[in-house]
Amino acid sequence: MSIKLWKEDDRPREKFYLKGKSSVSDSELLAILIGMGSREKSALDLAKDILSDNDNSLEKLSRLTIKELMEYKGIGEAKAITISAALELGNRKQSEPRNDIKSIKTSRDSFQLLKPYFNDLRQEEFYIILLNKALKPMKIERISIGKTDATLVDIKIIAKLALNYLASTIVVSHNHPSGNLTPSAADNQLTERIKGALNLLDIQLLDHIIIANDNYFSYADEGKL
């Protein structure tokens, strides 16, 4: 049945307007972005299929490319760009600075600051947080972009940034796109090398955070620093 034949307050757009944004499901929100479906399926049915193919995960959905979205019958270039743009707005909203975190007191503080930078990445990336003596974040900087299972890190770049900002303490972080939080032997070796280099400069390595989706591993919490 076409969405136009539904009762007005059951249609996604009308429901959003009359009952509020919290009243609509993820599939209904996606249907609003799609607008019109195909002859075979309504926009809502198409939205449900797309979400189902991605385990009903908005995170997985946001990783789809424009071309991958266009593989669905009824999703042309314009609709694919609309969907991708809407999801990117959501990502950028999450990436806005956390003004409520005045200083890094726990590993979760570091995780909350860093997580938005790793949203939807298919490859490993490496970031650092530069902190002053009060452990207040002064700068978050990407150091390198790697492959799906590894990234190369130049410790000289980390040291140079720390000296340029007169940082007293640093948190380093990278992601595991595989979802596996267990540090690799290479992760452990890199952590020791960074810690040793910073010690020579009288700069403390406060933590190394590994991020995988909505979870994280903290070297400091595990007593590995």
Image (cartoon, rainbow, N blue to C red):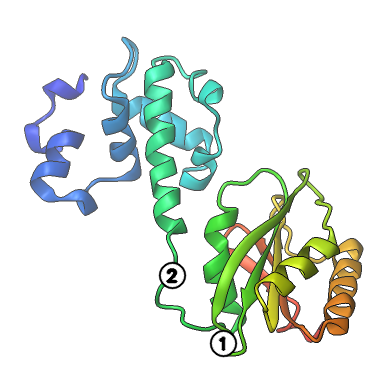
Q: Which one is nearer the viewer's eye here, 155 or 92?
A: 155
Query: Which of pointers 2 and 1 lies earlier in the amino acid sequence?
Result: 2
Is 177 above or below relative to 28? below
Q: Position of residue 67 (x, y in %)?
A: 54, 21
Q: Residues within 10 Å of mark 2 (few under 14, many from 20)?
A: few
Q: Secondary structure at mark 2?
A: loop
Mark 2, residue position: 98
Mark 1, residue position: 105
Report whether residue 106 is seen. yes
Q: Secondary structure at mark 1?
A: loop
Relative horizontal placement of residue 46, taking residue 9 as reference (left or right): right
Is 72 above or below relative to 214? above
Is 151 above or below relative to 34? below
For the image, the number of numbered tags is 2
Label 2 to label 1: alpha-carbon separation: 14 Å
Q: Amino acid at mark 2?
A: Arg
Q: Amino acid at mark 1?
A: Lys
Q: Position of residue 18 (x, y in %)?
A: 8, 45
Residue at screen point 51% across, 47% down: 59
Q: Which one is nearer the viewer's eye here, 145 or 219?
A: 145
Report whether residue 75 is seen. no
Residue at screen point 62% across, 46% down: 121
Quarter that holds the C terminus: bottom right
Q: Which one is nearer the viewer's eye here, 172 or 30?
A: 172
Quarter that holds the N terminus: top left
- Residue lying furthest top: 39
Q: Which one is nearer the viewer's eye here, 53 or 151?
A: 151
- Residue lying furthest bottom: 134
